[in-house]
Image: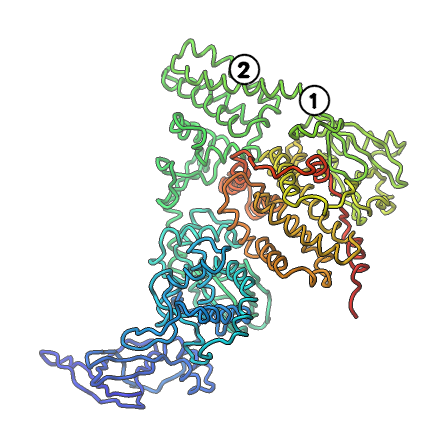
Amino acid sequence: MSGILDVRIVQQDSEPKIPVTLCTLSVGNTFGESILQDLPRDTTVVTQTTCELLRVEQQDFKLIWEKNKDLMNELISSCKFKNGFGPSVTASTKMQQQPISPPPRRSLSPDQPNPAEPITDTPSITISKIGKSLRTLLLSENTCLKDRKVSGRLVRRCAPGTELVDWLLELSPGIHTRAQAAGMWQALLEEGVIAHVSREQPFKDKCFLYRFWADEEGTAPALPTHEDVAAAEVQLQESIVTLINRGPDAVLRMIMRKPSHERNQDDLETIYEELLHIRALAHLTNSVKRELAAVLLFEAHPKAGGVLFHQGDEGRSWYIILRGSVDVVIHGKGTVNTLQEGDDFGKLALINDAPRAATIVLRENNCHFLRVDKENFNRILRDVEANTVRLKEHGKDVLVLEKISPQQKTAFSYFKYTVMAGTPQKMLEHLLETRLDNLAGQSNTAQDPFLEDFLLTHIVFMPTHLLIDELDRNYHLESPNQDRDFVVACKKRVVQFVYRWIVIIRHPVFEDESAVEFIEDLAAEVEQDCIQYAELQEDCSMIHYVMTQLRRYQEDLKMHEQKWKLPPCGQPISLFSGGDEENIRQMIHPQDDIIFRVYCADHTFCTLRLPIDSTAETIKLIAADKLKLRATHELCLVDVRSNGERVFFKDNDISVPTALTLNGRIFVSPKDHLDALTPLAEQEEPTQGIDSDIELFSTKELAYYMTVFDWELFWCVHEYELIYNTFGRHHFGQITANLDVFVRRFNEIQYWVVTEVLMSISLSKRVAILRKFIKLAAYCREYQNLNAFCAIVMGLSNVAVSRLSMTWDKLPSKFRKLFTEFEALIDPSRNHRAYRLSVGKMQPPVVPFIPLLLKDMTFTHEGNKTCLDGLVNFEKMHMLAQTMRTIRFCRSRHLVLEPPSPKSEGEVKSYISCLRAIDNQKVLTNMSQKLEPRRS
């Protein structure tokens, strides 16, 4: 653009080597075209005067050359302005020695993403509006946006990152930390709404200067008008909510765009937590995911139709789709597959060191990927194998251990290896020999993850009767040399294991007759062995504790022999006597009786009283006998739901009455008459509840007693019930009644919300109830009753309610914005990321969103094999145990809430314990359309 440069070359045959000027370039000349050939520079370019240059990056130049369209216009648009200060600035170039030919085809992938650059060509409309609003408010307050001198040049309207963060924190009480505010600014930066003044930094809460793109382009008016400020203030709350939701993802993308060597430990942990929820990585071990966290790169492509790589290209990277979709195209066949978010591709070419087998074409704009380059991919595979220890017996693997990396070590740093897979017997042997000795002196709260994982999941791969056989064998191990220390150590380990078993698992151990018999025999033997081995005195006190817990459980069971009922009109399961409202709800035990109805096709019924753990076959045969049905071998037991759907029970299913849907009924019918089964008329009506006006109750009082009631239901759920539910309770012969009741409660609240809104005929009444429920959700969130909170929000999001536009239009904007914030919190995208981040900041007690825990269990189960090459996949057990530990964490403290001022305590408690609800979506939609008919 201006200035003069010399092009010089060093004479190789002269001593000393003297640089020779080949030519001089001035305004309008170009140099450096050799970047098209990927050749090294062989001349030096020296500035003679102060120069201004236009520079085109190699990847941009190659893309432009390939397109060969409007070449000069694109060159100009992609150039960067560069100042040269003085004659000492040098650069290298290669003189053009041959005609320039088009470069070889290349991937769209950048070599190294720059976290300071936007990930889109143009910002989205939503983010553009938010940026405009924030800039307007900043300028109206005349605070931190000022003209400043940077490196001798004037930069218009810029502000330090620290001041921008301070301003956001003062602007909204919903922003709690500086890191959260910085993430919100990063969400604007990654779409190009703001930028670092020299485009060298992502957003940081430091003294780096940032400015809005409108000020950079010089297209914005000098100062906003009063109308602009008023409009910005109206949009402010919605803008803040949007940025709060987008901030964490923006920070994650910024971290993944950093070079690997710049990522700190917090960055790696953030990426690792994200990788745990990516479907394509579910089969990988956690150690591999931690390795990937250090090398994964983020890649964004703004335009559909681009080619990521071509068939026949060298395989250089493995890709995982974070957002968007791609087409898989093969020569001669066209598009053979479409890959969506969560899928991966490109791995086969790396494993086999083969050319790409297909071309990958972007299907939509703004596709986001994670990329692992070949070198890192191969290194991780090598490292995993190098850190793996395989123990063999008779030529076969029996235990696979993996070395624990420094990043994975916790308080248990003395454990050098973690168990990845093994036979059940060998894993138990390893646990007894290596873990219990180290834990002997530690408190109950400091549990070894491997020990706890084993105890929480052993029922999957080692049923209790096999476990106690192995424990009995280990207790009676004898040393060939009569080594006293060896014998004592074996006995101590078994006692300590049983002690930990009871502390961690509690009552399910006592419900197993073989386990009770083993514990009683073990206690007697320990008493005897204490006489011979003084070293067992401490273990004797442990076994005394175990026996105390067993006797207490047995006494409680005798004192609380319970009889439950499943009322005929859809009410929740309750104690047959009605119970004392002051009493805490009791846990449902397998031997408890339950009273329920079984119907046949003509809607006649019989009433049965059977144990909770009765099988479907037992229920079927007894009901058939009472109803005088013949051909019992041709009968089916069916859950007929309110919408007419039929769900069949297998003969070995147990806990049948508690597994019914909200308004379902149990039917028994011959197989050839199933089409005749229809719902009862009452099933289309609300479940029978207290007929009271919700407006008469204090919202805070409702939320308080709902939380207390839900907490009692949650407290009764055992972690094992998650496994029974995931793998199938018939495999274990165990009930899931307490989990069933808690899940039913979620559905009851959800459909209660919909029913109450739709049963309000007048518009003003519906608006008042909408407000009531939004306030109720807010109080439930405050009390950390997330199960009820999510149920209420999902009820208000039901299409039968969300379509009531006249009702929502009358709702004050304050409540609409609050509900928008709530909807964002339960947004299922990115595997419920917003909810998980929110829960991660909470301290117990918490009533968690139970459907998500069940989804996590199912995701882990279906995405990972239980056995690999004849060995138990213990990495899967660890992931299952992690979800089960969430329940343990949420109730690791007792619920202590300050009750609100009592106004109608008895009425409220009765009301919230039995809510009226219609769960037939067709009926609800019809009710909604009668209230507000479709507009033509």
How many C-alpha atoms fall within 10 Å of the one at disc 1: few (<14), some, or many (≥20)? few
CA neighbours of label 2 inside 10 A, class few (<14), some (14 to 19), many (20+): few
Answer with mark 2 or mark 1, whichever residue precedes in sequence: 2
The residue under label 1 is 561
Q: CA distance from mark 2 to mark 1?
A: 27 Å
Q: Which is nearer the eye, 639 or 529?
A: 639
- Which residue lies under the disc numbered 2? 521
Left or right: 89 in relation to 437: left
**Which residue is rendered at x = 62% and y = 33% of the image?**
716
The amino acid at mark 2 is: Asp
Between 655 and 220, the one lying in front of the other is: 220
- Does the image show residue 740? no
Q: Is residue 576 left or right of residue 408?
A: right
* Left or right of 715, for residue 741: right
The image quadrant where one finds the N terminus is bottom left
Q: Which mark is residue 247?
A: none
